[in-house]
Amino acid sequence: MADENRAASLAAYGLLAVAVAVLQTTLFARLHILGTIPLMTYAATVCVAMFEGEQTGALFGLLTGYCIDVTASAVFGRTALILMLAGYAAGYLARTLILQSLTSAASLYGLAHGLVIAGDLLLRLLVTFSLAGFGGAALAQLRLAAVSLPYLPLFYLIVRRLGRAFGRPEYGVTP
Amino acid sequence: MGRIDKKSLLAVGLAALLLLIAMYSTRQSGEAGPVRSVVGAILTPLQRGVTAATYFVTDKLSYFTEHRALIEENERLNARVLELEQQLRDYDRYKQENENLREFAGVLEQEARYEYAYARVIARDPDSLFYTFTIDKGSADGLQRYDAVTTPEGLAGLVTEVGLTYAKVTAIIDEITPIGAVVSRTRDMGVLESDAQLHTQGLCRVNYLPGEGSAAPGDSVETSGLGGLFPSGLVIGTVVEVQPEAHNISSYAVVRPAVDFANIRYVMVIKSFVAPQAEWAGGEP
């Protein structure tokens, strides 16, 4: 029974990942706020990781990112890599350190964006040995985090409801 | 601090390595691999459906919200039709005159021939502001990397990646391969290239123009056909301003593209073309 529930919940998260990618590249790609297109992907990945753990979080991030990469102009695999690592980190931290709450989700969300900025900094230092353009890229990432924040409570509620529907056991640090 | 699950960490590390390899391999060719083609084939109908539904709803809503604007546009278009009808009469006269002169000079012209594929825009890159988009035709329809993508307004971009049922199109203002361009009025040639700063304003630039007199604001810019990648005569856009290059030998023109990238719904992909060639009927002139 537990295995069936696990398989069903994984299938549901797979469908959610595809739905997020499709909506992000179609309907929500037309939405501009402060010259930036808000992204659902970070919020969705962080929430799935927080409620389901690092394995599901990383898988969800990988699948969502891969689907986005099929449409995006950036180097193929970049989004998948970022979201997979963000999902893994968020899941691990949620399992070991923090409470499952909207505030925690917001902290993990901020951390995920922070990781992107840190990764960018690291790549620039290791590959190009130059920080030219880093400030602008970091600001753009922070702006993206700000305009995409409204998606967070939405996915928090969706993933929490999904988990309960599939009888998810108590997980991580709970209040 | 909880224990790290070594198996999942190993799996994530392995996946990260595979993604890095994928990122590297993509930089080498514009062909989507089999896995990406399969994912694309699954996503394409979903994206097509959502996009069609979005357009249906926005079109219905626009009937109510844009009624006044549509009436004004109708009046403006009626005036424009009258103006164009006059131009058409002039055109017919010039065309006949041109044919007579060609006949007189003994020039035979082979007309340009294009093979098109019509495609719908089904998805847009969420990382950039509409400058890369996905169309619902791919290698199964005969599309290839670097095929020119046009709209009735002019050149939109070129195919940069081809999957089985989809293709990614990079707009001319995005990072793109340089395109031969010519200023319609002066016939001075330059090279159309993207510019990181202008890109955010929806503009691009034509570099290496011979001098500041090569172009002026309002001039039309079109493809020159040089390089053989694109046919000649595709409208690129209108010159906004002309500036000297840093070394002051040549100048560059800032160009506003003719295509409204935010609202493209349908495109025509030029799969192959035969450039027009003039031949002297009696051999060498």
Image: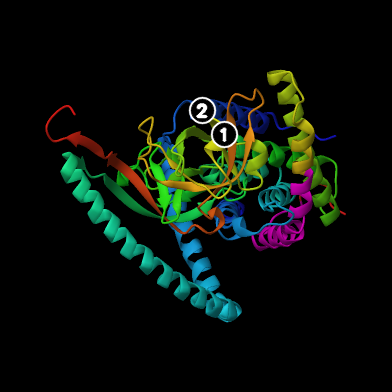
Q: Position of residue B226 (x, y in %)?
A: 38, 32
Q: Do tag 1 and tag 2 residues touch (Cβ < 8 Å)? A: yes
Is A119 located above or below residue A45 in the figure? above
Q: What label does residue B164 carry, if any?
A: none
Residue sitting at x 29%, y 55%: B94
- Is residue B250 visible in the rendered image? The answer is yes
Please report the residue visible at 71 percent of the width from the left and 58 percent of the height from the top.
A155
Q: Nearer the viewer, residue A83 or B101?
A: B101
Could you say whether the residue bearing mark 1 is in a helix, strand or loop? loop
Subunit that carries the residue with mark 1: A
Which quadrant would residue B230 be assigned to in this image? top left
Residue at image mark 2: B27
Pinpoint residue A35: horizontal percent, then vertical percent: 71, 52
User: Is residue B39 in view?
Assistant: no
Assign the N terminus of chain B to one quadrant of the image: top right
Compared across the picture, whether B84 is left or right of A147 comes to: left
Where are the magenta residues, as a range? A142-170
Give the amino acid type for the residue marked by disc 1 in the picture.
Answer: Val
The local crowd at label 1, few if under 14, some if 14 to 19, many if 20 or more residues have their Cα within 10 Å, is some
Instruction: Tell me which secondary structure the magenta stretch mostly adopts.
Output: helix
A166 magenta-colored: yes
Q: Chain of mark 2?
A: B
Question: Magenta stretch: residue A4 in it?
Answer: no
Foreground residue among B173 and B82: B82
**According to the image, label 1 marks what residue?**
A75
Q: Is residue B6 above or below residue B187?
A: above
Residue at the image position 19 percent from the left and 34 percent from the top: B279
